[in-house]
Image (cartoon, rainbow, N blue to C red):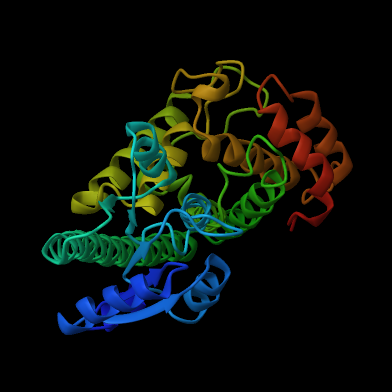
């Protein structure tokens, strides 16, 4: 309707009155002033006209057979496609209660009968101008919203490309790290997709979240890539006290990603990458680092924590031939509610057979 109104240079005014003489008087007055008009002798006829052509303003009598003007106005205000059309009653309103009912129904004004031509034209002009300004402002706001969305998408696209480029550099330097990155990334996306079906997360985990965690999770261990080679590194999965080396890796990774964000600090992909690098060693019960527990740990980091530890377990046992995937799953389950978010573990149990383990 708004686009149709914007394209129409001359406003279209709908006149609704069961007395044809009143309709003719208003039509002559408005067309002489340069407006386009269409008319109906009852509400049903008016509704049929509105389906064909949305008017810019409606002038309606109050007392009409079958459906009166008040109900007509209420019907239009309940419909999102017509609720913004200015609705003016032209009628005999004898009491303040009648006037109150008219405004409660959604009318913007009323013009008493017998009406004065100058008053009718003045009020019609004022409400059309107000309507036009509201539509122009709405169009401007939509345009600005689209521009902001486009800019955000461009930022996210550039950030995603930058993160993927960094992950490729890490892979070239360390092939095993590349395998781990790929597995954690894929498995985090699967976990996030599974959690979308949980009522508590259906509005939290959006498609954008799923896409972002698949990219950002590749850099969860970027700190290890940046730290000097040869320092001791791996801590036990179930250990509450991680090594100082691993702690420094997390801090270093988060700091370098924060520096990379620069002017794009509000970007979704980079902010998630920072969060994951910083918190993926924080565990549900408050162990790990930095100090955080339960829901205070960012959701994306809670997902990565499980995916990361599961892949490390598989690499240490299954790949080396000392254990099975099922045994790794049992170990993860044993730490549900201790190291890992119970909701993430719940989804993990449903989809672990689809997760990458090689």
Give above or below for 245 relative to 287. below
The residue lying toward the viewer, choosing from 56 and 28, is: 28
Res 229 seen here? no
Q: Residue at x 73, y 57 (%)?
A: 356
Dividing the picture into quadrants, the one containing residue 227 is top left
Residue 133 placement (x, y as % from top left): 18, 62
Q: Nearer the viewer, residue 115 or 302?
A: 115
Quadrant housing the N terminus: bottom left
Give the quarter of the image for residue 32: bottom left
Question: What residue is shown at x 11% (from left), y 64% (from top)?
Answer: 118
Whether residue 194 is visible? yes
Q: How many marks?
A: 0
Residue shown at the point (37%, 58%) measured from the top left: 84
Q: Quadrant of residue 137?
A: bottom left
Quadrant the C terminus occupies: bottom right
Relative to 66, is 156 on the left or the right? Answer: left
Residue 297 versus residue 358 in the image, above or below: above
Left or right side of 307 for 90: left
Q: Position of residue 285 (x, y in %)?
A: 61, 16
Q: What's the residue at 65%, 43% (across, down)?
A: 307
Q: Position of residue 35 (x, y in %)?
A: 22, 80
Seen from the viewer's position, the closer of residues 226 and 118 is: 118
Left-right relation of 153 to 242: left
């Amino acid at each position: 309707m708004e686009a149709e109104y914007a394209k129409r240079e001359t406003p279209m005014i709908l006149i609704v009155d069961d007395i044809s003489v009143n309709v003719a008087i208003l039509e002559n007055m408005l067309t002489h002033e340069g407006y386009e008009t269409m008319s109906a002798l009852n509400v049903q006829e008016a509704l049929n006209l509105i389906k064909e052509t949305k008017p810019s303003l409606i002038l309606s009598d109050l007392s009409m057979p079958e459906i009166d003007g008040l109900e007509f106005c209420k019907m239009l205000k309940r419909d999102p496609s017509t609720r913004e059309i200015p609705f003016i009653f032209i009628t005999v309103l004898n009491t303040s209660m009648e006037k109150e009912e008219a405004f409660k129904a959604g009318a913007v004004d009323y013009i008493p009968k017998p009406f004065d031509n100058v008053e009718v034209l003045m009020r019609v002009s004022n409400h059309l101008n107000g309507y036009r300004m509201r539509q122009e402002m709405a169009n401007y706001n939509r345009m600005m919203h689209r521009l902001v969305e486009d800019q955000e998408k461009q930022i996210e696209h550039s950030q995603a490309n930058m993160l993927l480029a960094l992950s490729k550099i890490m892979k070239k330097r360390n092939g095993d790290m590349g395998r781990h990155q790929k597995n954690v990334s894929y498995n985090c996306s699967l976990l996030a997709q599974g959690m979308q079906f949980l009522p508590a997360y259906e509005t939290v985990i959006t498609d954008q979240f799923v896409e972002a965690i698949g990219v950002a999770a590749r850099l969860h261990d970027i700190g290890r890539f940046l730290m000097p080679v040869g320092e001791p590194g791996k801590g036990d999965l179930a250990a509450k006290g991680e090594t100082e080396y691993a702690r420094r890796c997390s801090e270093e990774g988060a700091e370098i990603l924060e520096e990379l964000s620069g002017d794009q600090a509000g970007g979704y992909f980079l902010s998630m990458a920072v969060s994951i690098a910083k918190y993926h060693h924080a565990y549900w019960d408050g162990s790990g680092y930095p100090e955080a527990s339960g829901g205070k740990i960012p959701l994306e980091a809670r997902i990565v924590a499980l995916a990361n530890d599961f892949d490390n377990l598989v690499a240490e046992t299954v790949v080396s031939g000392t254990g099975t995937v099922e045994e790794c799953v049992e170990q993860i389950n044993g730490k549900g509610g201790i190291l890992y978010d119970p909701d993430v573990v719940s989804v993990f149990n449903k989809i672990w057979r689809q997760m990458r383990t090689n």
